[in-house]
Image (tube, rainbow, N blue to C red):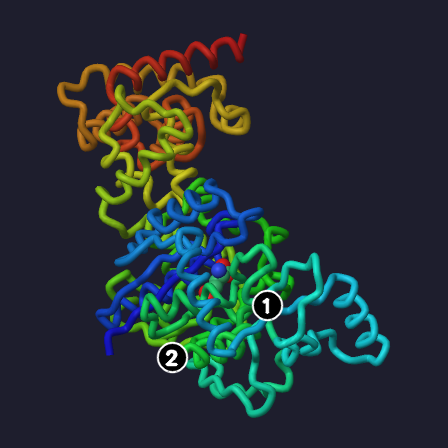
Amino acid sequence: MNVRTRFAPSPTGYLHIGGARTALFSWLYARKMGGTFILRIEDTDRERSTQASVDAILEGMAWLNLGHDEGPFYQTQRFDRYAEVIQQLVASGHAYRCYCSKEELEQMREGQMARKENPRYNGLWRDRQDETPPAGIEPVIRFRNPQTGVVEINDVVRGKITISNAELDDLIIARSDGTPTYNLTVVVDDIDMQVTHVIRGDDHISNTPRQINIMRALGFEPPKFAHLPMILGSDGQRLSKRHGAVGVMQYRDDGFIPQAVLNYLVRLGWSHGDQEIFSREEMVELFSLEAINRAPSAFNTEKLLWLNQHYIKTLPVAELEAQLQWHLQAQALDISTGPALAAVINAQRERAKTLVEMVAISRYFYEEFAEFDPVAVQKQFKADTADNLLVVHDELAALATWQGEAIHAAIQAACETLGLKLGKVGPPLRVAVTGSASSPSLEITLELIGRERVLQRIQRAIGFIRTLAA
Ligand code: GLU
């Protein structure tokens, strides 16, 4: 079978974590099976759909590098096709016009509530098609749902689910203005796009039996379904905006790398033994729908951070370099007058959990820092520090080559001259050249900052310490 999956977001907001996971699983399954991944934008709700949301979804998919093979298809461009199918269903008797007024529907509802029944359409117009319709009412079109029998779903994740047709009322498939409703458009698209596997959030599970009935009425057998378990926030409630950043691009802004987010997402509801780290290739190779968990999974920011750090430590430098570009722009750091970015990444990759942090802790390589960290000053700048730094300065100034080993030797020589241990000379030197108490090893830090800046900064620190003492 040629596997065809689809991701079908409604563009009513950004691509959130739950949507991204759905997209990833659909993408993975298509890739794993050598199949086709379709992107379909379900924009029929014209009031809530926006171009900005479409753009945000496409941007999120591109950032995660979940490329589609077909589409994006837009439902708003397929209204003629939906109208055709609706007519076909009316003509074949599988759908009918319903002229109930708002008031009638409201009365129906109230009566049912009073009798403690579930509110549902009672089929009033099901068998009234020969009657003269009331004047002044534009009818809706309802699907004539079977009234007996059951719908069986063999959900790949949840197993067998059986719903009695008696529980399903006659769903509106076209509004009175003729526009199609969600369940109709999904069915028509899944048929036309020859979707073989519908992989989506389990919030859609109640739609599934209705969609299956419509599909069968059109003469098609339904695809396979895999309903993904919910994602919960730390408080056990369905993950939502209340839990903080859930838009995918927010993770980019916060310094996460897409590989880490994908790796994190794949483990939300899917597992392969105890394995936590999966490259894209491994995900594709190991993924299976059968290994999706039934139980909801909880979102865990700590774990995402841990994965991010893992990828910062291990990705090829060129890859990190490419991803850092956006952050350099966003944080307005001009790197044209400093060391090669790749060298800085190598020096800092063990020290940053996010790319935002990476940029923040690397500024001193490229521009002057505004002030010495007051806590570090308190701890490291003593009365004799200025004189000691001067000795270091002169040793460094005399170096023929500005390179790690030579720098190390010069600092050692200064220690000997001063009769002090490196533990006494190094920390104030670090504060002098970086402004703070933490940086990579001294020789690497100094090498990368560059001779001229280092010598100037030591002078600046000496001056600063002397004003402190005065
Ligand atoms: N458009 C629906 C949503 O964004 C998804 C429909 C589907 O996957 O069948 O929730």
Q: Residue at x 45, y 85 (%)?
A: 154
Q: Give the residue pinned by disc 2.
A: 220
Residue 21 lies, with reference to residue 58, above or below; the image says below
Q: Residue at x 24, y 19 (%)?
A: 451
Q: Is mark 2 within 8 Å of ligand 1?
A: no
Look at the image and tell me whether residue 306 can be seen: no
Residue type at mark 2: give it.
Phe
Q: Residue at x 36, y 20 (%)?
A: 367
Look at the image and tell me whether residue 104 can be seen: yes
Q: Residue at x 38, y 27 (%)?
A: 363
Residue found at the very far right of the displayed protein:
114
Residue type at mark 1: give it.
Ile
Judge left or right: residue 465 versus residue 111. left
Dividing the picture into quadrants, the one containing residue 366 is top left
Percent of width and height locating residue 179: 53, 57
Chain-order first, disc 2 or disc 1? 1
133 or 173, which is in the foreground? Answer: 133
Count the labels in the image: 2
Percent of width and height locating residue 198: 40, 71
Percent of width and height locating residue 388: 37, 19
Q: Secondary structure at mark 1?
A: strand
242 or 53, which is in the foreground? Answer: 53
Q: Give the residue pinned by disc 1.
A: 172
Crowding at label 2, few (<14), some or many (≥20) Cα neighbours within 10 Å?
A: few
109 or 273, which is in the foreground? Answer: 109
Crowding at label 1, few (<14), some or many (≥20) Cα neighbours within 10 Å?
A: many
Q: Secondary structure at mark 2?
A: loop
